[in-house]
Amino acid sequence: MHKKLSLIILLFLPAVAQAKIDLAGELSVGRSQKKDDTSFSVKGVYNYNQYFGVEVSYIDFGNLAETEKGDHGFYYYDVEADSVNLGVKIGNYLHKDLYVVARFGLSLWGGSLGTLYESTLPPVEDRFTDYPTLSDEGKGYYFSFGFRKHLTDNVYVGGELTQYNWDSQKIFYFENYKLNNISLLVGYDF
């Protein structure tokens, strides 16, 4: 995962070096629809103008507990997942300090499948199955919609709803796995 992040940063830097510096950084905390675990994200944005920018980000989704109905009852498993993202940002001001934004791009994700157990009735644990930890990584895409409100000329707060679409049959058991994440953010325009 770190090699991918390094490659993305190296590809991103020449665009920044050749143009007027208009950078922003964001930190966010959120939750996914799968479990009440906290996600953390850090994002760097290069703004070409107020309407368009490119971004690179990293998000750790925490523990995504899954429940799935099977032939003999319910299956529960824990998934640790993270993602490095490279995308574009499109937005505009609705008001002097209120900015609406849409983002979309490539998601390079990695994850590992941990504990797995079966039960006839959730959440009663009938049988624990000790499977080896599975790891997987791949590509997908993401898109999000959100807003930000400037508190000062440089500092802003906001919120976003992001959907990640991944292809993984090894960990998530779905050809097109969708993960929604809602987050609150704080950002700084450099």
Image (tube, rainbow, N blue to C red):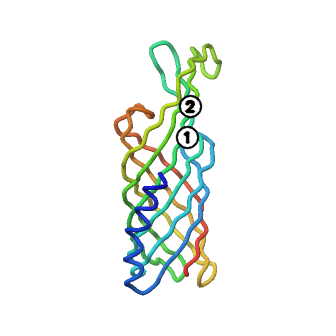
Q: In this rendered view, identify the residue nearer to me: 136 or 106.
A: 136
Q: Which amino acid, by three-letter code, is at mark 2? A: Gly
Q: Left or right? Give the position of 20 relative to 186.
A: left
The residue located at (65%, 18%) in the rendering is 124
Whether residue 115 is situated above or below residue 7 in the rendered picture:
above
Please state the horizontal and vertical placement of residue 49, each as a whole percent of the image: 40, 82
Judged from this view, the residue extending furthest toward the bottom is 20
Judged from this view, the residue extending furthest toward the front is 3
The residue located at (36%, 41%) in the rendering is 167
Q: Which amino acid, by three-letter code, is at mark 1? A: Glu
Q: Could you tell me which secondary element the residue under label 1 belongs to? A: strand
Numbered label attached to residue 119: none
The residue located at (55%, 79%) in the rendering is 189
Q: Residues within 10 Å of mark 2 (few under 14, many from 20)?
A: some
Circle nearer the N terminus (1, 2): 1
Whether residue 28 is situated above or below residue 54 in the rendered picture:
above
Whether residue 73 is situated above or below residue 110 in the rendered picture:
above
Task: Say which residue label 2 marks.
Answer: 114
Task: Say which residue label 1 marks.
Answer: 80
* Mark 1 touches mark 2? (CB < 8 Å): yes
Give the mark count: 2
Q: Residues within 10 Å of mark 1 (few under 14, many from 20)?
A: some
Q: In 3D space, how far apart are the residues under numbered discs 1 and 2 (Cα atoms)?
A: 8 Å
Please state the horizontal and vertical placement of residue 5, each as a whole percent of the image: 46, 59
Please state the horizontal and vertical placement of residue 104, each as a whole percent of the image: 38, 60
Q: Could you tell me which secondary element the residue under label 2 belongs to? A: strand
The residue located at (60%, 14%) in the rendering is 127
Please state the horizontal and vertical placement of residue 63, each as a whole percent of the image: 59, 40
Q: In this rendered view, identify the residue nearer to me: 69 or 98.
A: 69
**Which quadrant: the C terminus?**
bottom right
